[in-house]
Amino acid sequence: MRATIIHAPGDIRVEEVPDPEIRHPTDAIIRTEATCVCGTDLWSYRGIHPVAAPQPIGHEYIGVVEEVGSEVATLRPGQFVIGSFVASDNECEHCRGGYHSACRRRELVTGCQAELVRIPLADGTLVALPEQPGRELYPGLLAVSDVMGTGWYAAVAAEVRPGAVVAVVGDGAVGLCGVIAAKELGAQRIIVMSRNPERQRLALGFGATDLVAERGAAGIAAVRELTAGSGAGSVLECVGTGESLQQALGIVRPGGNIGFVGLPAGVDISGRQLFHSHAGVRGGMAPVRRFLPDLIDRVLGGIIDPGLVFDLVTPLDNVAEAYRAMDARQATKVYLQP
């Protein structure tokens, strides 16, 4: 099969590799109908996360079941499925508590920018649709496998409630999906920190009410001015840098909450700063599996359309160009067709 392999920072290639095989009786093999490039993939592409040897990459996928292991009970070949980037059994106490990404048997799913993917713990990880969806729904369903689920978790972790004032730090795909989530959860006001005109347009279409282009102290002052000096009760931190988290801490009101879902890089938080902020901070690797059934229904019902975050569509063979476009911020998120 063809698969995307990262050899070194900036070196992405599509190569012929052996087809995946069932390794454990709880595995499934799916044929990917669509996959994409994630902002977190760029950490390896940029050399922030070391690449010690050539390895498969990608963790977002929708597809059709090709084969199942002998202990897989709820899936059969031919079903259209969506899964999380973390394989989970959906049974342990962490999963039952809604934190599937902390499953006691968890495995990270990778190598999804390929024609075929092995999914561990298939019964717990994959959600089968009742029938094959139309291709026009593929982008929205693919977004659910990560960025929409992560944006939704950011809003849940930040305790967005009806009537809430929400601020979103980060205008990438996760931040934009966070706007969708905040709107769906009843936020009255949604302030998005963005200076990119196309992303601003999307944010407003998704339900944002205010845009702030400033950063740092100026950005904090702008949000404070918009909120009569109080700050936002719920802040969605969707980047993961030290600067973005400081931005979130600067704009959250005392007693407010920060949903921290950006994969951290260079983040160093002072305990004293947290102590004096009176803010709650919750987040981590998003338990996307927890939200899949609900989000799938919202996409199938036409209630939300997170697939609009894909602004570049390209064949898998052009994946190197997809990475270059996202690295240069010429694309928000790239949809790959195997």
Image (cartoon, grey):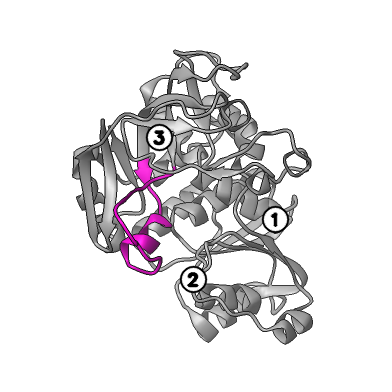
Quadrant in the picture for the C terminus:
top left
The residue lying at 53 percent from left, 33 percent from top is: 120
Q: Which residue is mark 1?
A: 157
Crowd class of label 3 (few under 14; some 14 to 19; many from 20; radius 10 Å) = many
Q: Position of residue 326 (x, y in %)?
A: 30, 57
Closer to the camera in the image, 337 or 58: 58
Considering depth in this image, is 89 or 69 the residue closer to the camera? 69
Choose the circle earlier in sequence order: 1 or 2. 1
The picture places residue 298, in percent across and down from the top left corner, at 58, 31
The mark closer to the camera, 1 or 2, is 2
Q: Is residue 45 magenta?
A: yes
* Relative horizontal placement of residue 233, taking residue 33 as reference (left or right): right
* Residue bearing the label numbered 3: 139
Mark 1 lies on a secondary structure that is: helix
SS of the residue at dot 2? loop
Distance between the Cα atoms at labels 1 and 2? 20 Å
Residue 191, magenta (yes or no): no
Q: Earlier in the sequence, mark 1 or mark 3?
A: 3
Disc 3 residue type (three-letter): Pro
Q: Cα distance, mark 2 to mark 3? A: 28 Å
Location of the N terminus (image quadrant)? top left
* Residues shaded magenta: 36-59
Mark 3 falls on what kind of element? helix
Mark carried by residue 265: 2
